Image (cartoon, grey):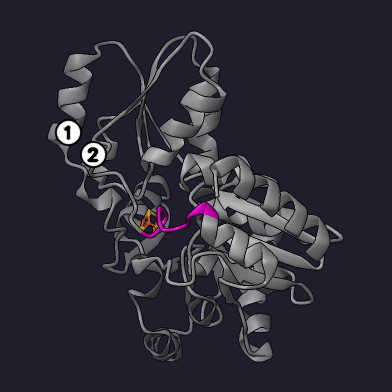
């Protein structure tokens, strides 16, 4: 089948099965183009809750499809590429969080949205990379345990000097690889060009850049600049910007080979077609207690305006 034929079949199957397709910005460009809604993980999960469609196909990794299911329990939620996972989302055992909370009842346990439902269910509050600083600084608790990303946790600690933030030692294996030398080299090549970075990168790398924020924050910043912008996050973001928002400027990717998430690139158009038709992908199932406890952490984030 040609790409055009697959796209036409996806469109027909979508209508026949009452399905909406979500794609994270890190997905391959042809998947982003085939999706109904694109964005970062929380935007996708929240956007779908009020839609009338009975089925959702998520092109992303497993925790993202779980987050959709947490917020939309009555919909059938399918992860298009069944093996796509996020290594960071499982870097702490939920039972260790439970034990920590029992031993430290006055500490708020704050989890990044990039966690499994089982982990969210053990935490007090969930945050995104764009809301983490605002929410942690507004919490009534003085002591915070931030899980699982040590880099985002250290970014939060630096920006919330009134709080005592303990960070778990997890990390994103993609963003964590970026070094100060990588940033210095690209800045030397493109002097006076602003650099936007994701706070999943190490703090000493973030410190060399002009702004740090979530995928949505980076896209907003990049679009607002009058000239070229250097992008220091997963390469899907610069690909998206160059394809959809370039105009007469260029979005320059830092270390494109390093900043490629293999799990995010697993989805193919054939996977997507099979998932939409109900012949592939992985249906997300959550037990109701886990779902409701995980939802509490997300609802608390929303209550803090996250
Ligand atoms: S880029 Fe990092 S945090 Fe995002 S899905 Fe890949 S491994 Fe997980």
Instruction: List x then y, in percent, for residue 269.
Output: 53, 52
* Above or below 283: residue 67: above
Report the residue that reaches farthest toward the right: 52
Instruction: List x then y, in percent, for residue 11.
Output: 73, 50
Instruction: List x then y, in percent, for residue 47.
Output: 73, 53
- Residue in the image at 34% along x and 52% along y: 261
- Residue in the image at 61% along x and 59% along y: 273
Observer-nearest of 78 and 254: 78
Discs 1, 2 touching: Cβ within 8 Å: yes
* Above or below 144: residue 260: above
- Residue in the image at 25% along x and 14% along y: 190
- Residue in the image at 52% along x and 41% along y: 30
Visible in this render: residue 59? no
Q: Is residue 265 magenta?
A: yes
Please tell me in which quarter of the rendered image ligand 1 is found.
bottom left
Where are the magenta residues, as a range? 263-269
* Mark number, residue 205: 2
* Mark number, residue 182: 1
| Mark 2 Cα shell of 10 Å, populated few (<14), some (14-19), many (≥20) | many
Judged left or right of residue 277, residue 268 is left
Helix, strand or loop status at disc 1: helix
Instruction: List x then y, in percent, for residue 56.
Output: 70, 64
Please identify the dominant SS of the magenta region: loop
Observer-nearest of 169 and 242: 242
Marks 1 and 2, how far apart in space?
9 Å
């Amino acid at each position: 089948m040609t790409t055009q034929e697959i796209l036409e079949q996806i469109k027909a199957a979508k209508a026949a099965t009452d399905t909406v397709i979500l794609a994270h910005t890190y997905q391959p460009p042809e998947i982003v183009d085939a999706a109904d809604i694109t964005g970062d993980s929380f935007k996708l999960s929240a956007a779908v809750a009020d839609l009338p469609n009975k089925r959702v196909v998520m092109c992303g990794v497993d925790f993202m499809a779980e987050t959709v299911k947490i917020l939309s329990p009555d919909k059938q939620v399918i992860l298009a590429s069944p093996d796509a996972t996020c290594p960071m989302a499982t870097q702490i055992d939920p039972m260790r969080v439970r034990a920590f909370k029992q031993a430290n009842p006055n500490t708020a346990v704050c989890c990044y949205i990039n966690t499994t439902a089982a982990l969210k269910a053990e935490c007090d509050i969930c945050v995104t990379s764009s809301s983490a600083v605002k929410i942690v600084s507004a919490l009534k608790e003085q002591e915070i345990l931030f899980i699982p990303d040590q880099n985002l946790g250290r970014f939060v600690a630096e920006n919330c000097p009134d709080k005592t933030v303990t960070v778990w030692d997890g990390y994103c294996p993609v963003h964590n690889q970026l070094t100060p030398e990588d940033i210095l080299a690209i800045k030397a090549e493109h002097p006076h060009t602003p650099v936007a970075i994701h706070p999943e990168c190490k703090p000493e790398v973030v410190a060399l850049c002009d702004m740090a924020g979530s995928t949505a924050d980076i896209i907003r910043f990049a679009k607002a600049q009058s000239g070229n912008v250097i992008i220091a996050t997963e390469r899907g973001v610069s690909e998206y910007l160059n394809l959809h928002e370039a105009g007469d400027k260029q979005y320059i990717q830092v270390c494109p080979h390093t900043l490629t998430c293999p799990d995010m690139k697993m989805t193919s158009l054939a996977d997507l077609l099979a998932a939409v038709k109900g012949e592939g992908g992985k249906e997300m199932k959550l037990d109701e207690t886990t779902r409701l406890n995980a939802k509490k952490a997300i609802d608390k984030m929303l209550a803090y305006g996250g």
